[in-house]
Amino acid sequence: MMTLIIPRKEAPVSGEGTVVIPQPAGDEPVIKNTFFFPDIDPKRVRERMRLEQTVAPARLREAIKSGMAETNAELYEYREQKIAAGFTRLADVPADDIDGESIKVFYYERAVCAMATASLYERYRGVDASAKGDK
């Protein structure tokens, strides 16, 4: 058996190779939704979409609100049908639960996250999804 000792490198002081760790998010209040659909927690969106702190809270909030509005509009007729059937919230609509959460609520939140993230990525050059990394 052989022991390998790898010496620690000195941490870079500045310039190339410096790692910048953004400050943790401050208080990001939950975004209130309409009476039928669930409120959205920006912290949960950050975690799900791996946005960290590179996206300013105000910018993220705007993108989430846009995602909520678009998703709510897409589900308008569905909401009206469920309200007519006597359900007052999406969480009340019968559905299987996974990990203690209604799959309908899970998919709603996932749709909002996807819309918000797409909005951020299409409007700001800070994210590059091209193969070459230069678009």
Image (cartoon, grey):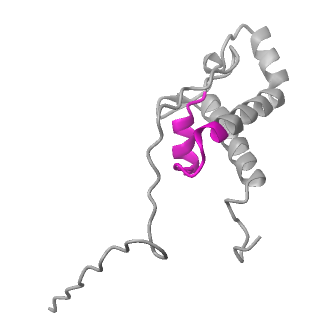
Q: Residue 129 in the image: state x and y as whole percent.
A: 70, 65
- Measuring 53% from the left and 32% from the top, which residue is drawn there? 28
Q: Is residue 104 left or right of residue 97?
A: right
9 in the magenta segment: no
Q: Residue 96 in the image: state x and y as whole percent.
A: 58, 29
Q: Is 123 situated above or below 77?
A: below
Q: Is residue 12 left or right of residue 51?
A: left
**Number of marks:** 0
Q: Residue 70 in the image: state x and y as whole percent.
A: 80, 33
Looking at this view, is 50 or 104 the one in front? 50
**Residue interval drawn in magenta:** 40-60
Looking at this view, is 91 or 119 the one in front? 119
Residue positioned most to the bottom: 2
Residue 6, picture quadrant: bottom left
Q: Is residue 66 left or right of residue 61?
A: right
Q: Residue 134 in the image: state x and y as whole percent.
A: 73, 74
45 in the magenta segment: yes
- Measuring 81% from the left and 15% from the top, which residue is drawn there? 80
Residue 94, picture quadrant: top right
Residue positioned most to the right: 77
Q: Is 79 situated above or below 5?
A: above
